[in-house]
Image: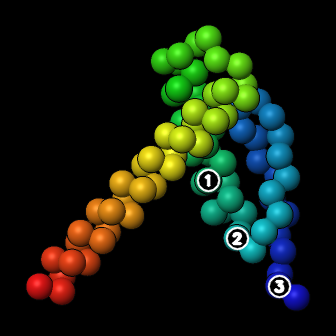
Amino acid sequence: MSNQNRTTVHIFGQQYTIIGEEGAGHVNKVADLVDQKMREIRHQTNNLDTKQLAVLTAVNITNDYLKLVERVKQLEGKKEE
């Protein structure tokens, strides 16, 4: 059985307990990034409810992730040349 860690974090004013293999430091960094992105989007678009804000945040973070994945592929391709 894998070692599961419990970490309590706060995201956009709500408390969550995250259970997983990652350490507290990593989980806190993830939570801080999500919180920061939610607050950034809320500042730009004040008329969203929390659910809409969470979905838009997920879309934004996934977009950033996919851009990074593509950039890594490009860099790996240049490395092989």
Residue 48 on image: x %, y %: 64, 17
Marks 2 and 3, how far apart in space?
11 Å
The N terminus lies in quadrant: bottom right
> Mark 1 belongs to which amino acid?
Val
The crowding category of the residue bearing disc 3, from other C-alpha atoms within 10 Å (few below 14, some 14 to 19, many at least 20), is few
Residue nearest the observer in this picture, 7 or 41: 41
Q: Of helix, strand and loop, which one carries label 2?
A: loop
Residue nearest the observer in this picture, 11 or 71: 71
Residue occupying image coordinates x 51% and y 49%: 62
> Mark 3 belongs to which amino acid?
Ser
How is the model colour-coded?
rainbow
Q: Are marks 2 and 3 in contact (CB under 8 Å)?
A: no
Left of 24 or right of it: where is 80?
Answer: left
Q: Is residue 6 visible?
A: yes
Give residue 39's quadrant in the image. Answer: top right
Q: Is residue 76 above or below residue 11?
A: below
Residue 47 on image: x %, y %: 62, 11
Q: Is residue 36 visible?
A: no
Residue at the outermost left position: 81
Q: Is residue 35 above or below residue 45?
A: below
Residue 56 on image: x %, y %: 58, 33
Give residue 15's quadrant in the image. Answer: top right
The crowding category of the residue bearing disc 2, from other C-alpha atoms within 10 Å (few below 14, some 14 to 19, many at least 20), is some
Q: Are marks 3 and 1 in contact (CB under 8 Å)?
A: no
> Mark 2 belongs to which amino acid?
Glu
Which residue position holds label 2?
22
Q: Of helix, strand and loop, which one carries label 3?
A: loop
How many discs mark residues in the rendered view? 3
Marks 1 and 2, how far apart in space?
11 Å
Marks 3 and 1, how far apart in space?
21 Å
Residue occupying image coordinates x 21% and y 78%: 77
